[in-house]
């Protein structure tokens, strides 16, 4: 489980531990560990190679997925909004670095000294990263040799968590509330559950002046059916002989058969409760992603609530839990990477 943090000069990282500000006799120096390298202030400042056409730093972002990557730019002068989005598939280029060069050439970017930030649909850390379900293998030393600076690399669910940092109440809709209502100020600690082509899990803690993001690969924990309806669903799933996971139960081949929505909604409710208890996310669960539409409507919503709000083992911790669906906006993973980068630069 990785941890990103920002507090009074702390910088987020993708390797698992936030770095505290380093005090020196000449003043404070900020640093962040990125895959074995300490990135200092001078690595983050603008230089001619990173300037946009109208001034300001241009960040090159890649959202790495099993089928390829979605590349984009975010500029300081554009308030870090993402633009120039282009998907490049694994069939078009044999390696990620080849695809990155191609995108940079399209936009006349000299990669030497240029800031690059990645989100990866899989665990991050170590010298090589790749997606859980296939795709390119990315040697981070090779990427750093090309750009001449350490890249920022975060998990895609962490990127979604970063995209929720500035959420307002107008972008929240209640899914399940405890008796007496709940605080929807988005302070405190929330679990993030993101349902798209895969299942992503993270945690965001804004309890004080600190923003802390926790990664998780909880989507891949073992799942076992708990009733007859779930056993029937398990029998239909095509898992190619592999152990059933929560992600497979919700999104695997056969999971979306007609009539399975209520069953899957119950599984999702149980999973959200488990994730919230694991993170200690007493302020609730934030759900997002296009895969939620069918699972949070009508009878399916009731099935979600029944499993989400049940007492476990004689305890009632989760009786106060709330669940909210958030408007994730456009391109939330790319936007989240840009938001993380902005926090890293500003400190």
Image (cartoon, rainbow, N blue to C red):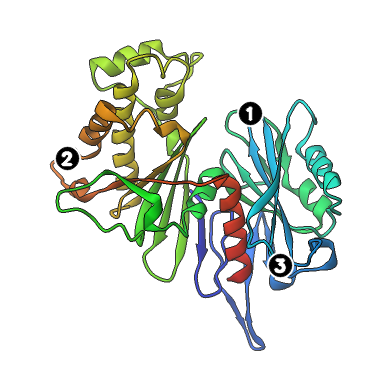
Mark 1 = which residue? 134
Answer whether residue 220 is visible to the viewer in this image.
Answer: no
Mark 3 = which residue? 44
Mark 2 = which residue? 311
| Residue at 81%, 57% in the rendered image | 148
Quadrant position of residue 293: top left
| Residue at 64%, 59% in the rendered image | 80
* Mark 2 closeness class: few <14, some 14–19, many ≥20 residues within 10 Å: few
Observer-nearest residue: 133 or 308? Answer: 308
Q: Label 3 near label 1: C-beta < 8 Å? A: no
Residue 76 picture location, percent across and down: 68, 64
Residue 238 picture location, percent across and down: 47, 13
Q: CA distance from mark 1 to mark 3?
A: 32 Å
Farthest-out residue, left: 314
For residue 153, side relative to residue 213 (left or right): right
Q: Which mark is residue 125?
A: none
- Mark nearer the viewer, 1 or 3: 3
Quadrant position of residue 65: top right
- Identify whether 27 is placed above or below 5: below
Answer whether residue 94 is visible to the viewer in this image.
Answer: yes
For residue 253, side relative to residue 187 (left or right): right
| Residue at 35%, 50% in the rendered image | 279
For residue 59, side relative to residue 81 (left or right): right
Q: Indicate the secondary structure of the residue bearing disc 2.
A: loop
């Amino acid at each position: 489980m990785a941890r990103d943090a920002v507090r009074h000069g702390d910088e987020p990282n993708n390797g698992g531990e936030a770095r505290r500000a380093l005090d020196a006799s000449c003043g404070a120096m900020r640093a962040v560990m990125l895959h074995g390298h300490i990135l200092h202030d001078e690595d983050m400042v603008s230089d001619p190679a990173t300037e946009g056409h109208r001034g300001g730093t241009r960040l090159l972002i890649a959202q790495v997925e099993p089928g390829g990557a979605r590349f984009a730019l975010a500029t300081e002068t554009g308030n870090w909004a993402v633009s120039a989005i282009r998907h490049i598939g694994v069939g078009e280029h044999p390696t990620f670095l080849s695809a990155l060069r191609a995108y940079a050439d399209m936009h006349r970017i000299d990669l030497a000294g240029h800031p690059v930030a990645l989100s990866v649909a899989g665990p991050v850390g170590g010298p090589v990263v790749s997606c859980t379900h296939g795709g390119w293998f990315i040697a981070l030393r090779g990427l750093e040799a090309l750009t001449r600076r350490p890249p920022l690399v975060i998990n895609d669910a962490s990127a979604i968590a970063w995209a929720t940092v500035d959420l307002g109440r107008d972008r929240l809709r209640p899914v399940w509330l405890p008796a007496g209502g709940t605080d929807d100020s988005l302070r405190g600690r929330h679990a993030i559950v993101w349902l798209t082509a895969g299942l992503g899990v993270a945690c965001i803690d804004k309890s004080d002046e600190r923003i802390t993001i926790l990664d998780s690969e909880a989507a891949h924990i073992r799942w076992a059916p708990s009733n007859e309806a779930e056993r029937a669903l398990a029998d239909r799933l095509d898992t190619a002989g592999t152990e059933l996971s929560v992600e497979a139960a919700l999104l695997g081949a056969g999971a979306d058969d007609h009539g399975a929505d209520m069953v899957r909604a119950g599984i999702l409710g149980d999973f959200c409760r488990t994730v919230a208890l694991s993170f200690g996310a007493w302020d609730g669960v934030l759900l997002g992603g296009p895969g939620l539409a069918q699972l949070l409507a009508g009878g399916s919503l009731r099935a979600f609530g029944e499993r989400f709000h049940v007492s476990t083992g004689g305890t009632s911790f989760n009786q106060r839990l709330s669940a909210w669906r958030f408007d994730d906006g456009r391109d939330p993973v790319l936007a989240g990477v840009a938001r993380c980068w902005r926090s890293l630069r500003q400190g």
